Amino acid sequence: MANLVLFILTMYENNCPSIAPHSCLASFLGILSFQPITQNPLPGSSPLALVKMGAMYFKKSNRLHHAYRLFTCLWLHAGVIDLLLNMFNILYYDLYLEKKFGSV
C-alpha cells in the first residue's frame, strides 16, 4: 500500500496538465495523468517531480547533505511499469519467504 500511495502522491506533485496540458498521457486522469513518453518512457511522473519527492540525485545528496534521499528513493517509482514489477517481486518473494519460514 505504501508504494501505491506514494506513487499517487508523486503523480499529484507532478501535475502534468499544468506543465504540458496537451501532451499528457491518459489525460482523462486529470492531475494524475502521465508525462509524455519523450520525458519519461515509463508511464509516470517527470524526473523533476521525483527529485522533489526525494529521489536519489547525487548533486543534492552530496553537497546539500540530503541523507534522507538514501531511504526515500526506495519507495519512489519512475512509472506504472516500475511500480507493477516492484509489487510483483514483493509478492513473489513474500510468498516464498512465508512458505519457508511461516507466516510469523
Image: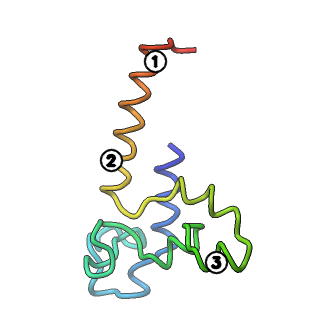
39 horizontally vs 73: left or right: left
Look at the picture and state if 1 lies above or below 19: above
Look at the picture and state if 17 lies above or below 41: below
Horizontal and vertical percent position of residue 55: 55, 67
User: Which residue type does callout 1 highlight?
Assistant: Glu
Q: CA distance from mark 3 to mark 2?
A: 28 Å
Q: Secondary structure at mark 2?
A: helix
In the image, which disc is placed on residue 98?
Answer: 1
In the image, which disc is placed on residue 36?
Answer: none
Horizontal and vertical percent position of residue 72: 60, 58
Q: CA distance from mark 1 to mark 3?
A: 39 Å
Q: Quadrant of the C terminus?
A: top right
User: Which residue type does callout 2 highlight?
Assistant: Leu
Q: Secondary structure at mark 3?
A: helix
The 10 Å Cα crowd at callout 2, few under 14, some 14 to 19, many 20 or more, is: few
Q: Which residue is mark 3?
A: 60
* Badge 3 or badge 2: first in the primary sequence: 3
* Badge 1 or badge 3: first in the primary sequence: 3
Look at the picture and state if 18 lies above or below 91: below
Question: What residue is rendered at 37% in x and 72% in y?
Answer: 30
Q: Which residue is mark 2?
A: 85
Q: Quadrant of residue 92?
A: top left
